[in-house]
Amino acid sequence: MNVADERMKPLEKASAQSVEARLIRRLLAFFGNPPFEFVLWNGDRVSPRTDPVATIHVSSRETLYDILRDPQIRVADAYSDGRVRIDGDLVALVQEVYRNAPRGEAGTLLQRVARLLHPPKHNTLAGSRENIHHHYDIGNDFYALWLGRTMAYTCAYYPAPDVALDAAQVAKMDHVCRKLWLKPGDTVVEAGFGWGALALHMAQNYGVKVKAFNIAHEQVMFARERARAAGVGDRVEYIEDDYRNIAGQYDAFVSVGMLEHVGLENYEELGRVAARAIGSAGRGLIHSIGRNRPASLNRWIEKRIFPGAYPPALSEMMHIFEPSALSVLDVENIRLHYARTLGQWLELFDASTDKVLAMFDEKFVRMWRMYLSGSIAAFTTGTLQLFQVVFASQENNSIPWTRDHLYR
């Protein structure tokens, strides 16, 4: 028995009589024979020997051939369009895909080929604005339905597993502030501030002054109104501009959830911006989705949800720090915290389906459900990581000797 035969062994032999059934067997073999059941438009079934985690209904022969042309993109597209229906646990389905994906050298080669054939959009000054507008400027009201009170669209931090979403987001902000050793009177510059929650939290709870840079117009407007309502407009300045235009020197540099949108080609410049901002006595923190090894973001998510996004490996993140002689002081990986954050977002999103439908359409709802479910699966299987990296100038000796300050 050859390798191909062995990969097809888990499928019922009787289910592979038609041409379409044989093609589905090849599709399942491509994804590592996950325990999925397929139901075709004519009632034919292709079933695994074990209990399926999900049943995939294919609406037509045209849909099947469309999927076979590019499974990594077309399966999710067909689900979004309603040409494929999935009965069962969508998160579990994507988890099985990730668990069965090629690893080692074969996986690396496939990832390199995918990056060459489908490179992410560039993050030039103009390109960054276009990419960010595609995702973040689709309506503050939409994000308010499922991000929670803080409107923080980044990984939360759970001191205990049963902590609620809003409390976990506040805990994340405190975790970041403690890592930066913030004290009253400090000045902070933030690169990419989302809807402004972290800058507001730092000013209100740590007595610092913050300049925060962002290029998503709707977020900037929201954050400015938020600061005005909170009465801290004199301590928080939200600037609609690119991080590359940060000037001046500060006690701390922080970036939470922006690095994914910077682009590898701009890492050295980001390092120069951060080094210039903190000088010889400041400190910095970058919080980013990442990888265990270099690989592109899921092609469907990069194409449909996050154009231009790229989650770096730690080795790639070092291109920020090494050229500017920045010393890495601490690295923490909190990927399971992001899986839980996404799970709570998905619960709120599903509870708001009728409102999302009123804003957009059914395709948009399914597309975002796939995105959130697939992201949960990526973090639970370790396909994606979440890194927090603390750094300072190599000349800075005013740094903590231990991590006690994080957990007091």
Image: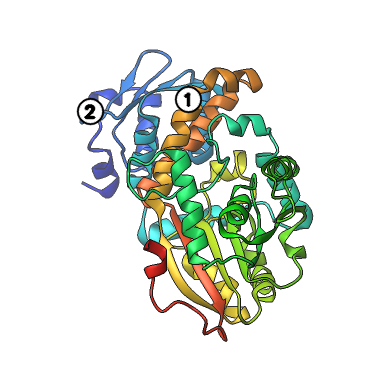
Quarter holding the C terminus?
bottom left
Nearer the observer, 157 or 177: 177
Q: Residues within 10 Å of mark 2 (few under 14, many from 20)?
A: few
Find out whether the residues at labels 1 and 2 contact each other: C-beta distance under 8 Å. Answer: no
Circle 1 sits in a helix, a strand or a loop, which is it? helix
Left/right placement of residue 65 relative to residue 30 reads: right
Nearer to me, 94 or 220: 220
- The residue furthest top is 42
Along the horizontal axis of the image, is 161 left or right of 335? left
Residue lying at 48% horizontally and 23% vertically, measured from the top left? 351
Q: Which mark is residue 350?
A: 1
* Above or below, 288 relative to 63: below
Q: Secondary structure at mark 2?
A: loop
Left of 378 or right of it: where is 256? right
- Residue 193 appears in the rendering: yes
Taking 100 as reference, is 363 above or below it? above
Front residue of this view, candidates 394 and 111: 394
**Where's residue 166, x and y in %?**
48, 40
Q: Amino acid at mark 2?
A: Asp
Q: Nearer the viewer, residue 306 or 355?
A: 355
Residue 68 visible in rendering: no
Residue at (56%, 44%) from the top-left corner? 152
Q: Is residue 33 above or below residue 316?
A: above
Q: Which mark sits nearer the N-terminus, 1 or 2?
A: 2
Q: Is residue 359 left or right of residue 407?
A: right
Q: Which residue is mark 2?
A: 51
Based on the displayed image, in which of its 4 quarters is residue 191 positioned? Answer: bottom right
